[in-house]
Amino acid sequence: MRNSTIKKKLFVGVALPLLLGTTVLAPIAGATVITSKNWRFEAPITGPTAITAPADITLDSAGNFWVANVSQNTIQEIKKVGSNYVPQEPLSGSGPTALLSPGSVVADHSGNLWVTNSGGNSIEEFTYSGGVYTAQTPIDGFNSPMGIQIDSAGNLWVDNSGSTYGGTGNGGIQEVVNVSGTWTLQSEITTTNLINPYDIALVGTNEIWASDQVQGTSGPGNVLRLVKSGGTWHEANLFEPTGNNTFVGPQGVTVDKAGNAWVMNFGANSIQEIAKNGSTYTVEAPIASAGHPFDQPNGIVIDPKGNLWTANFGGNSIQEITFTPTADLASTGFSALNFTIGASLLLVFGVVATRTSRRKLAL
């Protein structure tokens, strides 16, 4: 994830050498091109200040990335300084405000951060003032919350996965509204096919997309498009493809400005587009790299340029995937039929990404 959005991506992991000392990181030369979709995988960005097992990634209004380091119970800013990226000291809270298995993070327009504590059944705000983030008392009452989004009115939307990290359970989606300074949980949205939702994406005020693992991280799942009509949310579309296009443990989901949805298949190591064609949708074939296969991709987010950003869970890094027009392939230094990358694959768990296809993504 994100608006914030887009949790969370295409992914390939490549170890990134540290440049310019011990705190400033810069991308290095070397990338992989997937000619079927003209994707170019840039070198990963790592941090000695510990990007550790990132489970999600988001983009704030200043253009900086934030990741949720799930195993370290922290969130962390990766600040862009010129052409370099500088991982900042992680934030964790303490005592009653300590993070507990943060599953997702999102930034509002004021620079405040909201985090889901999947292990604490709560969400938590880190308020920003004078360059300092301060953890606030968590808001309880959730059921293994994973994804979190903020709508145009500043209200929060959280998906209750039903059980931590994709186990089976009965989940739903819940809005949290600020009423006279108090955040108030609204009635949970539940539908027939909303079983184990992992991530959500908002489209305006009357449309929600949700990835649903149904049978956990390795089993078949689905993606739902919910719409609000007459004050009631209902399923408008259920995407449950079979065969080679089956969603396997779908996790991160996001929607681009053209209305196309992007889904991360955690259990199939791929990303998949649900393309909008007027009033209908088509589930496209999964995108993966044969030479450098994905490994458990999770979140996805789109940056203002239409590029994808990912978080490599096992590689302790984040990574950009850019769109390369066919005419520009020769300038990359790679053959259109044979290309290599000078680093090993890293495990991808969380990721931020952007929407792109054979055509340039509409933003």
Image (cartoon, rainbow, N blue to C red):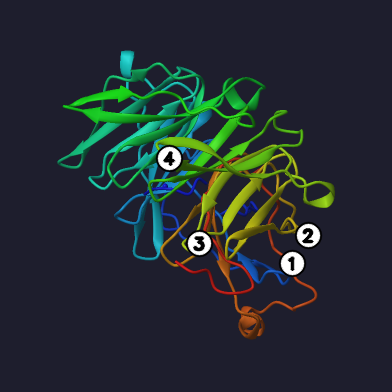
Is residue 84 left or right of 198 when viewed as pictured? left
Q: Secondary structure at mark 2?
A: loop
Query: Residue at horizontal 60%, vertical 79%?
Result: 325
Nearer the viewer's eye, disc 2 or disc 3?
2
Give coordinates of residue 349: x percent, y percent: 61, 40
Mark 3–mark 1 contact, CB under 8 Å? no
Q: Residue furthest front?
A: 230
Q: What whole-number distance in Å separates the C-alpha atoms at marks 4 and 2? A: 30 Å
Q: Amino acid at mark 3?
A: Pro
Q: Amino acid at mark 1?
A: Thr
Q: What whole-number distance in Å separates the C-alpha atoms at marks 2 and 3? A: 21 Å
Residue under numbered circle 4 = 49
Q: Secondary structure at mark 4?
A: loop
Nearer the viewer's eye, disc 4 or disc 1?
1
Residue under numbered circle 2 = 291
Please tell me which of labels 4 and 1 falls first in the chain.
4
Within 10 Å of disc 2 (Cα), the crowding (few <14, some 14-19, many 20+) is: few
Please tell me which of labels 3 and 1 falls first in the chain.
3
Within 10 Å of disc 1 (Cα), the crowding (few <14, some 14-19, many 20+) is: few
Nearer the viewer's eye, disc 4 or disc 2?
2
Q: What whole-number distance in Å separates the C-alpha atoms at marks 4 and 1? A: 29 Å
Query: Residue at horizontal 50%, vertical 62%?
Result: 27
Mark 4–mark 1 contact, CB under 8 Å? no
Q: What whole-number distance in Å separates the C-alpha atoms at marks 2 and 1? A: 8 Å
Q: Is residue 331 visible?
A: yes
Mark 2–mark 1 contact, CB under 8 Å? yes
